[in-house]
Amino acid sequence: SQTIHQWPATLVQPVGSPLSLECTVEGTSNPNLYWYRQAAGRGLQLLFYSVGIGQISSEVPQNLSASRPQDRQFILSSKKLLLSDSGFYLCAWSAGLTGTYNEQFFGPGTRLTVL
Amino acid sequence: AQSVSQHNHHVILSEAASLELGCNYSYGGTVNLFWYVQYPGQHLQLLLKYFSGDPLVKGIKGFEAEFIKSKFSFNLRKPSVQWSDTAEYFCAVNEGAATGFQKLVFGTGTRLLVSP
């Protein structure tokens, strides 16, 4: 069966520090991968998605970047964190199949607090 | 841009009470609609979905939702809630095709607390 992992679970970082959040998926190949963020009082917002290795699409301009160095690995990064980067970050995957509905499956999330 | 509104941010009910959570979206074209649930300590998971056909959709654990196109709504209902329904509920929308790659737009969520 498929499993999605995210780490760390919680993170407290000072403003201006770098960030690296990692997401890995097991039990599937060629998945579509997604990063979402939920800021306080707001809905889940899609930040990035990837349909293959090295292919990253950004949904909103921001202080963050994403990379997909391996088929089942998705990394969210920042060179210098801002206070506004605080929030709950969720990684998700879906099958990369065409012509059929592909449900998105979510990881446990990372709660990031920038002080 | 597409947006999703969930007007009830916090709902408190007693067991056996009926539940209705509101969801409205802004897109006027073809949409696919979803309700996700996150139980305490668990991952966000799909509760039910609507693509086409019968506007009344039944999901897991006795939940159902009704798509009313004229009202741009997809409200979630359950006739009799249980303590185990305590969770956060998210409405989501994807515009366009129901197959292949999808970009979901989520509402802000509704926290439901069911007291025994």
Image (spheres, helix red, strand yellow):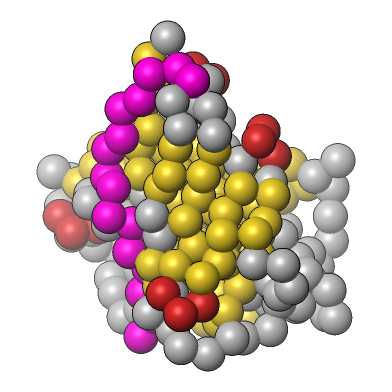
B76 sits left or right of B96 in the view: left
B54 sits left or right of B45 in the view: right
B55 sits left or right of A3 in the view: left
Which quadrant holds the N terminus of chain A? Answer: top right
Residue ID at (51%, 77%): B69
Residue ID at (83%, 74%): A100
Relative image position of residue A58 (x, y in whole percent): 45, 80
Q: Is residue A86 above or below residue B11?
A: below
Relative image position of residue A8 (x, y in whole percent): 46, 37
State the extent of the magenta-drawn residues as a range: B1-16
Which quadrant holds the C terminus of chain A? Answer: top left
Residue ID at (45%, 51%): B90
Confirm whether the magenta stretch covers residue A75: no
The front one of B4 and A71 is B4
- Most extreme residue toward the top is B116
The front one of A50 and A42 is A42
Q: Is residue B53 above or below residue A105?
A: below
- Most extreme residue toward the bottom is B29
Residue ID at (38%, 19%): B14
* Residue B99 seen in the current view: yes
Relative image position of residue A60 (x, y in whole percent): 35, 78
